[in-house]
Image: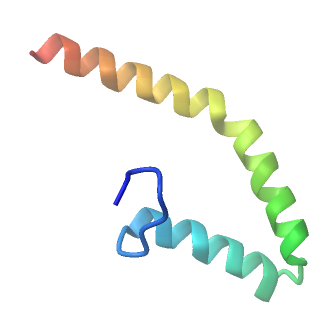
């Protein structure tokens, strides 16, 4: 299985699914609205995640 495919044995993937499920089940959003929120989350955190990745890669490069 690719790292880019959903794997429900991966806790991080489970948390994303649980969050989306909660938006529909508990917050009363439609599935379409939940995906709109997900898109907004992606737009708002992309740069932070990219920075984390750069720092991690830089740290790994220094180690070896």
In the picture shown, does residue 12 fall above or below 61?
A: below
Which corner quadrant of the image does residue 42 belong to? top right
Hey, which residue is sitting farthest left in the picture? 64
Q: Residue at x 21, y 14 (%)?
A: 61
Looking at the rendered image, the quarter that the N terminus falls into is bottom left
State left or right for residue 10 relative to residue 17.
left
Q: Up-down: is 22 above or below 3? A: below
Q: Is residue 39 visible?
A: yes
Observer able to see residue 26? no
* Colour option used: rainbow
Q: Position of residue 3 (x, y in %)?
A: 38, 51
Instruction: From this view, report whether residue 30 is shown above or below residue 58.
Output: below
The part of the image, by quadrant, that contains residue 17 is: bottom right
Q: Quadrant of the C terminus?
A: top left
Residue drawn at (37%, 67%), measured in percent from left and top?
10
Side of 1 relative to 31 (left or right): left
How far across and down, in percent of the image, does residue 30 sit? 90, 78
Please say if 33 is above or below 40: below
Residue at 82%, 68% in the rendered image: 34
Q: How many marks?
A: 0
Q: Nearer the viewer, residue 13 or 23?
A: 13
Q: Residue at x 25, y 19 (%)?
A: 59
x then y, percent, for residue 58: 31, 15
Q: Position of residue 51 (x, y in %)?
A: 51, 23
């Amino acid at each position: 299985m690719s790292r880019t495919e959903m794997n429900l044995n991966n806790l991080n993937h489970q948390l994303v699914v649980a969050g989306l499920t909660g938006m529909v089940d508990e917050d009363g959003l439609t599935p379409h609205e939940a995906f709109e929120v997900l898109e907004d989350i992606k737009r708002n955190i992309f740069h932070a995640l990219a920075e984390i990745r750069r720092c991690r890669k830089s740290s790994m490069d220094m180690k070896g």
